[in-house]
Image: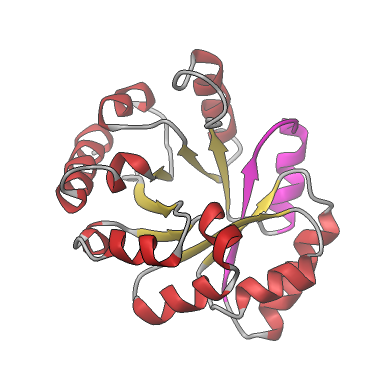
Amino acid sequence: MKIPALQLALDCSSTEEAIRDCQTGVVDEIDILECGYSLIAAEGARVVKLFREMYPEKPLLADLKIVDAGSKIGGMLLDGRPDYTTILCACEPGTITSVQEETRKRGLSTQLQIELYGHWSFDDVPLWKELGISQLTLQHSGDKPGGWDEEEIATLKKLCEYGIDVAATGSIGYDDLEKFRGIPVSCFIFGRAIRGAQDPAAEARRLKEKIKEIWS
């Protein structure tokens, strides 16, 4: 089974905070760096370009969860040359194709990922695959008490059966990884679990070692 990637979400409220979080050496320990939803909401699409310039070789994700105005919003994000960007599951298919067209205009190979929030259907997955979506991300909402429950784990397992990469995020820490044993998760996305650690770089290494132990 493929070893899941480790993604760090910079869900910060300012650029300065995000930069400080990256100056701990943690960026060298992760696979993907994410300009988080709250960071882009607070500072605008310019932060994507900033972190692309700071870390030109690190895979970069712009997480604004585009739901409409794909050409305009997608275009602003794509000007920062991210490797990945996210689209909300509630969007129209035309939003996906609009973002893809902006990608082509810029000569980029940015991959689009669908964020699963709220109401969606497994019947949507074949269409998303047909439209070229590279990954689905199942999130345990921060507004939902507790951690991942049996229903969410079952949903994650079923999504993986569709032959598309599936990431997991939200309320996941070191001790929670065992819940996902045996599931071919493509990526685990961590925020506070790493950024809030006393030594973020060491915690990222510890998480990667645990992931490797479970999925090797």
Q: Give percent across and percent down for residue 194.
A: 28, 45
Residue 59 in magenta stretch: no
Seen at 54% across and 78% down, the residue is 81
Q: Give percent across and percent down for residue 216.
A: 23, 39
128, 39: nearer the viewer? 39
Q: Give the answer, above or below, for where 73 lies relative to 115.
A: below
Q: Give percent across and percent down for residue 128.
A: 72, 49
- Camera sees residue 1: no
Res 80 quadrant in image: bottom right
Q: Is residue 194 left or right of residue 13?
A: left
Seen at 68% across and 59% down, the residue is 132
Res 209 quadrant in image: top left
Q: Is residue 212 left or right of residue 65?
A: left
- Camera sees residue 72: yes
Magenta range is 109-131
Res 139 quadrant in image: top right
111, 58: nearer the viewer? 58
Display colour scheme: secondary structure
Q: Give the answer, above or below, for where 171 lies relative to 128.
A: above
Q: Give the answer, above or below, for where 156 lies relative to 135.
A: above
User: In which quadrant will I find the N terminus?
Assistant: top left
Q: Give the answer, above or below, for where 141 lies relative to 83.
A: above
Q: How many marks on residues?
A: 0
Q: Is residue 155 left or right of residue 53?
A: right
